Image: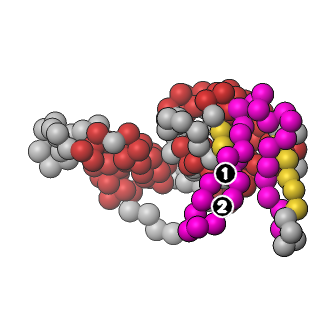
Amino acid sequence: MYIEVEKIQKAKEIMHKVASGINPLSGEQILNDGLLKDAEMVRCFCFVSDVLDNIAKGNYKNRSNALGFVITPEQKKEIVLPEGRIGVSGFSKCVNLCINQVESKRLTGVELNKKLKKLGILAEESTDVGKTRTITNEKSVQFGFEMVKKKFNGVEYDMVLINDLGKKYLLENLEIIMAVEL
């Protein structure tokens, strides 16, 4: 594939400036822009800048070639989790905003659930229609996982949520959990 390195470098510089709150046209500080006050948007601009930089340097690897989940201590420090209880998929989305997806496989709620089940922190049960669902067990509470009743379109269901204790546990042990063989 032919890569126009100069155009990629220019795009990378523009994304980096925007992420830093600088107008790429004038070089002046961008003031009072709600878009750039949103941490998720800033991380997105930084991520795109990093991807473009890696492409220009010839370091781009297809994500499917990534060996596994990789997160650095610096990336872990960047993870911002919402207040209150969240689901495993919500946790995974927050982590994926901070990892280098050129070097690491994305974290999915499904994979994280499987590994937590393997560790005995969560469990699984069969439903009356022959499907399986993730549930809590007697160990779940001590790790910060709770089962909560939710309602969507008039249908009630149980959802596993992570409280503050669970968020702390996952963040401190993420590499160990993701290294569990299934």
Name above or below for residue 20 compared with residue 125: above
Is residue 142 placed above or below 92 in the rendered structure? above
| Residue drawn at 84 percent across, 65 percent down | 127
> What's the magenta bit mostly, secondary-structure-wise?
strand
Residue drawn at 21 percent across, 40 percent down: 22
Q: Position of residue 180 (x, y in %)?
A: 84, 41
Amino acid type assigned to the residue bearing label 2 in the image: Glu
Asked if the stretch drawn in magenta spans residue 149, the answer is yes
Q: Position of residue 108 (x, y in %)?
A: 67, 53
Q: Earlier in the sequence, mark 1 or mark 2?
A: 1
Q: Position of residue 25 (x, y in %)?
A: 15, 49
**Apparent side of residue 142 relative to residue 47 in the rendered image (left or right):** right
Disc 1 is placed on an element classified as strand
Question: Looking at the image, can residue 178 be seen?
Answer: yes
Is 178 left, or right, of 36 in this rendering?
Answer: right
Residue 163 coordinates in the image, percent (x, y) = 63, 34
Q: Is residue 163 above or below residue 5?
A: above
Q: Amino acid at mark 1?
A: Lys
Nearer the observer, 18 or 123: 123
Q: Nearer the viewer, residue 2 or 102?
A: 102
According to the picture, the residue beneath numbered tag 1 turns out to be: 149
Residue, disc 2: 156
Depth check: give the residue in front, 25 or 6: 25
Residue shown at 72%/45% (left/top)?
Answer: 147
Residue 164 covered by magenta stretch: no
The image shows a total of numbered marks equal to 2
Residue visible at 58% across and 48% down in the picture? 90
Write the start and end of the magenta stretch as one range.
Answer: 131-160
**In 3D space, how far apart are the residues under numbered discs 1 and 2 (Cα atoms)?**
7 Å
Q: Crowding at label 2, few (<14), some or many (≥20) Cα neighbours within 10 Å? A: few
Tell me whether the residue at label 1 lies in contact with that at label 2, contact meaning CB atoms closer than 8 angstroms: yes
